[in-house]
Amino acid sequence: MKTELISKLEELLTKEAGEVALEVRALQKEFQKVWSMEFEKAKQQFIDEGGKVKEFVYEKQPDDTKFEALLEQYKKLKKESEDRLAKDQDKNLEIKKEIISKISDLSKLSDNVGAAIKKLKELQTQWKEAGQVSSHKYKEIQSDYSRAVEDFYYNLQIYRDLQEHDLKRNYELKQDVIVKIKTLQNTDSIKEAEHSIKAFRNEWEEIGPVPNEKWDEMKVAYRAALDETYGKIKGYYKNLEEKKETNLRSKQELIEKMKELTSSLDLKSASAWNTKTNEVIAVQNEWKTVGRTTEKDNEKVWTEFREHCDKFFDAKKEFFAGLHEKFADNRKIKSEIIQKAEAFKNSTDWVRTAQQLMRLQEDWKKYPSNGDKEEPKLFARFRKACNTFFDARKAHYDNLDASYEGNLKEKETILANLSTFQLSADITENRTALKQFVSDWNSKGMVPLKDKKRLNDAFYNKLDELYNQLDLSKNEKAAIQYQSKIDRLLASENPKDLLSKEADFLKKQMDEINNSIRTYENNLGFFKSSKGNNPLLKEVEDKVAFEKAKIDEIGVKRKMVIAELGKLREPVSS
C-alpha cells in the first residue's frame, strides 16, 4: 500500500505543484492512516509478546523516509510555484497601474474624441489580457481602473456618442454571462461553481453599458441567475450539515457500544484482555469510517468516546504492569534525571535552566513508581535539586522587584497629587502645572512590571481629563493631547520603536493625502477652459484646500515625533 502511495506522489511531483495540492494532502492523510495501522499492529504484537508499552519503539521504515523526502520535495516545488505566481502577480499589478495611468492621461486627446475612444478600447483590451493580481490587491486596483474609465467617459462627455453596435455587443456579452452563470447549476463541483461565479461576476462588471430600454430587464435576469446558482450552493452546504447530523447519531451509537464494552473490566487473564482489545479496536476502526459531525458537537463526542477508550487502555495498562512489575529500569532512568537536576541546581541562568528543569520534571512523570519502595528517596533527591534552583530564582526576582519599590511609591504619590489637583482660572498656570506633573512622572525610574500598566493608564487618563477641562482652542487642545500621547510612548519599554512606528504612520498619512491632492489638481485641468461660475470647480478647489490643511496639521505632529526621536538617538556624553 505504501509503495502505491509513493508512486502516486512521485507522479504528482511531475505536475504543477499548485494544481495538485489537494491530491498531495489526500495522499499524505492516506499514508498516515496506513502508518498508524502498522504502528498499532506492531505495538499490539509487542504487548502480546510480553513487552511493556513504555518500552515499545517503532523504527521508521525506508518507505516512511522516502515518503517524507518526497513531501519535502513537493513543499519546495510548491514554494517555487507560489514564488513564481507572486512575482507574476506583482508584474501584472505594475502593468495594470500603468494602464490606469494611461487612461487617466487620455484627457489630453480631448480635441480628437475618436482617437481617445480608440485608445481607451486598446487599453481596455490590454487590461483584459493582463494577468491576475493578488487577491488583496484586486479590489483596490479594479476600483482604480473603474474610476479611471468612469472619469474618462464623464469628463469627455462621450456617453451620448457611443455607437448602437457597441451597446448591442455589450448586451450580447452580458447575455452570455447570464447563460454561463445558469450553466453552473449543472456542475457537480461546488468549489468550481463558487470560483467560477466570482469570475463571471467580475466579467459582468467589466462589460460596458447596454441600451437603456433593455437594462432593467437584463438586470432582473442577471440577479435571478445569481440567486438560482447561489441557491444550489447553499443547498449543497445544507445537505452537508444534514449529513453531519447523521454522522453525529452514528457516533453516539458507537459511544454507547464502547460504553458497554468498558462497563466491566474485571478481567483475570491476558487472553481475556486481548480479546476485549480486539473488540475495542474494531469499534475504533468503525469510528474512523464515520465523517465529521456538526462543529458544536464534534469535539464533545470525540472527547466522550476517547474517555471510554482511555478508561479501557488505562485499566489494561495497569493489569499488565502488575504482571511484569520491574523497577530496575525506572530507577536507572530516574537516577540519571536526578544527576542532571543536581548539575543545574546552582545555575543563575534563570530562564533557560528553569525550562530545562521543567522538562526534567515532565520526564520524571513519564515513569510512575507503581509502588517502588525506593521511590520516596529518589523523589526527595530530585525535589531538593529542583527546589534549590527555584528558591534561588524566586529570591533573585524578589530582590529585583524590591529595587523598584521606591520608584513605585514616588509614582503613586505623583498620581495621588494629580488626582486631587484642581484647575485654577489662570490657563498659563494650569499648563505649567500639568507639564510639571509629566516631567516629574517621566523622571522616575522603572516600577514592578505588575504595576506598570495600571499606573500609566491611571496617570495619562487623568491628564487627558484635565486637559479636556481647559478653556483651549481646538488646535491647542489637539497639540497638547498629542504631546501627551508622545509622553506615553516615551514612558514605554521601547520608546524608540514606538516613536519610529508613529513617525512612519504619519508619513504614510501625508503620502496618501498628497496623492489625493494630485488627483484633485489633475481634475482641475478639465475645468480650465470652462466659462462662468462652475460649482464643480469650486467643490474641487475646496477639497484641495481642506486636504492641504490636513497635511500641515499632520506635518506638525511628525516634527514633534522626529524631535523626540532625535533626543533619544543623541549619544550620551562621557
Image (spheres, rainbow, N blue to C red):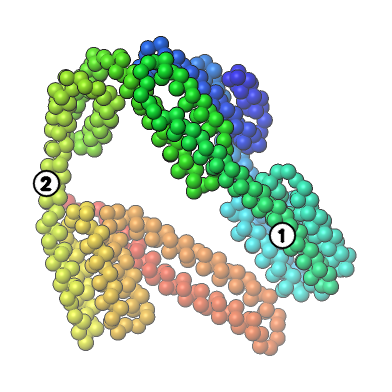
Q: Residue at x 22, y 74 (%)?
A: 434
The type of residue carrying mark 2 is Asn
Crowding around mark 2 (Cα neighbors within 10 Å: few <14, some 14 to 19, many 20+) is few
Q: Position of residue 391 (x, y in %)?
A: 13, 38
Choose top left, top right, bottom left or bottom right for residue 432: bottom left
122 sits left or right of 441 in the view:
right
Does residue 491 show up? yes
Q: Position of residue 487 (x, y in %)?
A: 28, 65
Q: How many marks?
A: 2
Q: Are marks 2 and 1 in contact (CB under 8 Å)?
A: no
Residue at the right extreme, as displayed: 165
**Residue with the mark numbered 1:** 227
Q: Position of residue 80 (x, y in %)?
A: 58, 35
Residue at the top extreme, as displayed: 49
Q: Residue at x 37, y 12 (%)?
A: 50
Q: Compared to 380, does 410 lie above or below?
A: below
Q: Name the secondary structure under disc 2.
A: helix
Q: Kindly report the distance in space between the C-alpha atoms of the residues bearing marks 2 and 1.
A: 69 Å
Q: Nearer the viewer, residue 303 or 557?
A: 303
Q: Position of residue 572 (x, y in %)?
A: 21, 53
Choose top left, top right, bottom left or bottom right for residue 290: top right
Q: Compared to 328, does 251 lie above or below?
A: below
Crowding around mark 1 (Cα neighbors within 10 Å: few <14, some 14 to 19, many 20+) is few
**Residue with the mark numbered 2:** 399
